[in-house]
């Protein structure tokens, strides 16, 4: 089973505006049109069995509508992490977390740069405690976002601080622990109890260094991911195959690790 742990799409009425705007800001090409139907086309062509939507609520007021949409689109091939925003009022946050649990999602996505918080800010700790107490994971965008300007708010050193405060929590750092911060990832995060996803990393790291990071961290803590539409699912899957991992390592990365988190 192949599970792409980090993808994006939008309701059809938003995709036509959102994807070109985001692509222009980042100077990147989109490999789907951002709709659910085109994501499924990409999955079929690549041989991806399940994709995990990772939505970003850029405003607190978006949380409810995004999670309602996720409830409607989740099926046998599409699952998701829930949307959350750290500035959501407490009573609405509790309602949102309960909904995320009720509809069977296993985590939430946070993007500190879009949501304007540093990942290790102590004001966030009570929010993290509420999330982790429900057995949910958090997937953080980590490192540089090429569509945004610095400061970057989720760097490996800040994630290391978070791990000290939440040593048994389910934390996933996208982009192999921190896009374009991989020297610091090696020093601060490698081998620790945190998952990395592979999204948008192989082409930048190169095969040799990517293989070294995977083996240094442990294949049991790596999740295949593409960041579709920004990564092409077929190409990213081919890139993992080119790493010449052993069959057990590849099987863990491509699906087994994700299946444990998703409980499937």
Image (cartoon, rainbow, N blue to C red):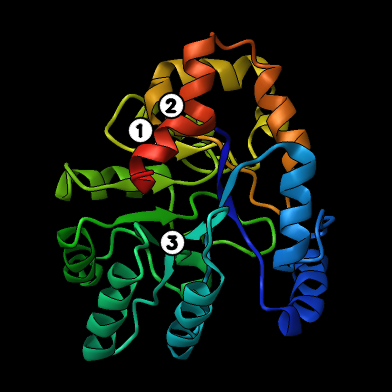
Which mark, by number, is residue 186? 2
What residue is pinned by disc 1?
189
What residue is pinned by disc 3?
81
Query: Where is residue 135 shown, x and y percent of the image?
Result: 21, 55
Q: Nearer the viewer, mark 2 or mark 3?
A: 3
Q: In which quarter of the view is residue 27 placed?
A: bottom right
Which mark, by number, is residue 108? none
Up/down of 128 relative to 255, above or below: below
| Left or right: 121 in relation to 212 | left
Determine the secondary structure under disc 1. Answer: loop
* Residue drawn at point x = 15 percent, y = 50 percent: 165
Asked if the residues shown at circle 1 and circle 2 are in contact, with their CB atoms under 8 angstroms apart, the answer is yes
Q: Residues within 10 Å of mark 3 (few under 14, many from 20)?
A: many
Query: Where is residue 139 shown, x and y percent of the image?
Result: 41, 54
Determine the secondary structure under disc 3. Answer: loop
Which residue is at the front of the view, 261 or 213? 261
């Amino acid at each position: 089973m192949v599970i792409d742990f980090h993808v994006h799409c939008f309701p059809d009425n938003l995709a036509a505006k959102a994807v070109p705007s985001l692509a222009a800001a980042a100077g990147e090409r989109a490999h789907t049109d951002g709709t659910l139907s085109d994501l499924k086309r990409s999955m079929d062509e690549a041989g991806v069995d399940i994709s995990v939507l990772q939505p970003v609520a850029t405003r607190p007021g978006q949380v409810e509508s995004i999670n309602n949409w996720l409830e409607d689109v989740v099926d046998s091939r599409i699952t998701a992490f829930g949307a959350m925003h750290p500035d959501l009022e407490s009573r609405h946050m509790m309602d949102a977390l309960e909904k995320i649990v009720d509809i069977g999602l296993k985590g939430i996505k946070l993007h500190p740069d879009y949501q304007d918080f540093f990942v290790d800010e102590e004001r966030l700790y009570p929010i993290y405690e509420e999330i982790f107490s429900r057995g949910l994971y958090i997937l953080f965008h980590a490192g540089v976002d090429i569509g945004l300007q610095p400061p970057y708010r989720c760097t490996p050193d800040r994630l290391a601080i978070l791990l000290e405060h939440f040593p048994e929590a389910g934390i996933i750092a996208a982009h192999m622990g921190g896009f374009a911060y991989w020297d610091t990832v090696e020093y601060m995060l490698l081998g620790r109890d945190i998952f990395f996803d592979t999204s948008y990393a192989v082409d930048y790291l190169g095969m040799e260094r990517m293989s070294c990071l995977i083996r240094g961290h442990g294949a049991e803590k790596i999740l295949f991911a593409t960041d579709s539409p920004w990564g092409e699912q077929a190409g990213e899957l081919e890139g993992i195959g080119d790493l010449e991992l052993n069959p057990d390592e590849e099987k863990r990365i491509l699906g087994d690790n994700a299946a444990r988190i998703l409980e499937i």
